[in-house]
Amino acid sequence: MAESKHETELEETEGLEQPPKKKRRHTKLRRWASRIIALLITIVLVVGAVYVVVHRDTISIDSVRRSLSNLVNGETQADSYTLKGDTSSCTAAFQGGILVCSQTDLQLFARSGKQEINESINFTKPVVSVAGHYAAVYDAGGSRLYLIRDEQIVHTYTSDKAGAILSARVSENGSLTVVERATGYKAAVTVYDASLQPVVTENISSSFVSDAALSPDGKTLAAVSVGEDTSGFDSVLIFYNVADGEELYRCALGSDVLLDLKWEKNGLWVVGEYGAYYVEKGTLTNSNTDQTRILQDFSLGGNGFAVLYCSKYQNGSGGTVELLTTQGSGSAISQNDEVLDLSAAGSYFSVLTANQLTIYRSDMTVYAQVDNDWGARKVLQREDGSVLVVSNGSADLYAPE
């Protein structure tokens, strides 16, 4: 009698390990769950995109970007942070959160509000430099520096060159430019890579160097040289080739005391007591300076512009907010109240007074305005148009709708 097909199949599979049916069912369920989640996310994004197109005249695009950024990062944006120290602490917006450094504490809060770094320190004058995923925190005139990547301290540095760090700036790739006092020289400028290995050192004996910054491509080093000539105080920008340490060109800025530097593509933004400058390949291409006014505050955080707050009076009242772009000076915005703080990032800048916070676009039109009910003394502009307002012991997020 012939065996049935069913009996033959049973005999052929005898002794073989049978597949775990439950596990297979669970695997299928997980696969379907993943597909459903992916489908839901796609629907949300598509519906969001359609909504933006339909309501593009009334909706804030940056508000949508902020929501999408939170979705991509998988974190909820905290509305407020509890900080040690006061408004005299050095603060910076960093990786969606906030970095705070006082004389005794170094703190980093993530976007979610979680505290990632809480380090006890002993600084006299804390300074913070932020670029991309990196931040450098150091004691100006001291010997200690911390290099932070994302949410952790990855390196510490102690100066052995006469024990004084004059300035330190971090680049987006983690490179670090440090200016220090050096025995036998007026100053030493060293460029380190992201692992704190020295790339090049310039020992300067001809003049005192107060600051230096590395170009975004890592090929050019700009240093602020301070000296004296027959007419008195003299400031000069000296540009060096990182590959061989040779001087490329110089740009003299007269008797102005230079306060800050920032590279943007192939150009260098410079701020001094007299105002702002834009220098390309050693040539001064644009400036906004006036020796009769008092520079009260400034920010080089914006893209394609420098923003200044200047006043005729020492107390800072009755001044104007002015912009310098790569193309020249823009219009000025008069301020009736004293400006407490000024901050720029991306295509926005914010002006904080005791009564009001105003966020402007880079074309100087108002993006948002709100009363300063926080009693804030500091403001940190973020690239998405939102700001962190800092008061004693806290920082609060303000995100225009």
Image (cartoon, rainbow, N blue to C red):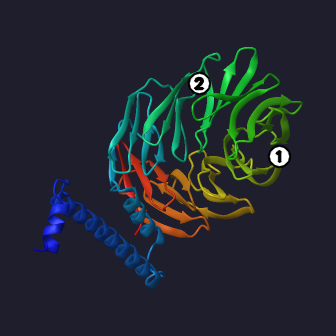
The answer to which of 139 and 287 lies nearer the viewer is 139
Examine the rendering and report whether any part of residue 148 can be seen.
yes
Examine the rendering and report whether any part of residue 277 can be seen.
no
Q: Residues within 10 Å of mark 1 (few under 14, many from 20)?
A: some
Q: Is residue 350 left or right of residue 87?
A: right
Residue receiving disc 2? 141
Give the residue at x 78% y 35%. 243
- Name the amino acid, label 1: Gly
Label 2: state its secondary structure: loop
Q: CA distance from mark 1 to mark 2?
A: 29 Å
The image position of residue 269, as x and y in percent, is 70, 49
Location of residue 193 with respect to 34 vertically, above or below: above
Residue receiving disc 1? 282
The answer to which of 371 and 349 lies nearer the viewer is 349
Give the residue at x 70% y 60%. 325
The image position of residue 136, as x and y in percent, is 54, 36
- Name the amino acid, label 2: Gly
Question: Mark 1 vs mark 2: which is more N-terminal?
Answer: 2
Location of residue 262 with respect to 63 vertically, above or below: above
The image position of residue 314, as x and y in percent, is 60, 44
Location of residue 127 with respect to 173 vertically, above or below: above
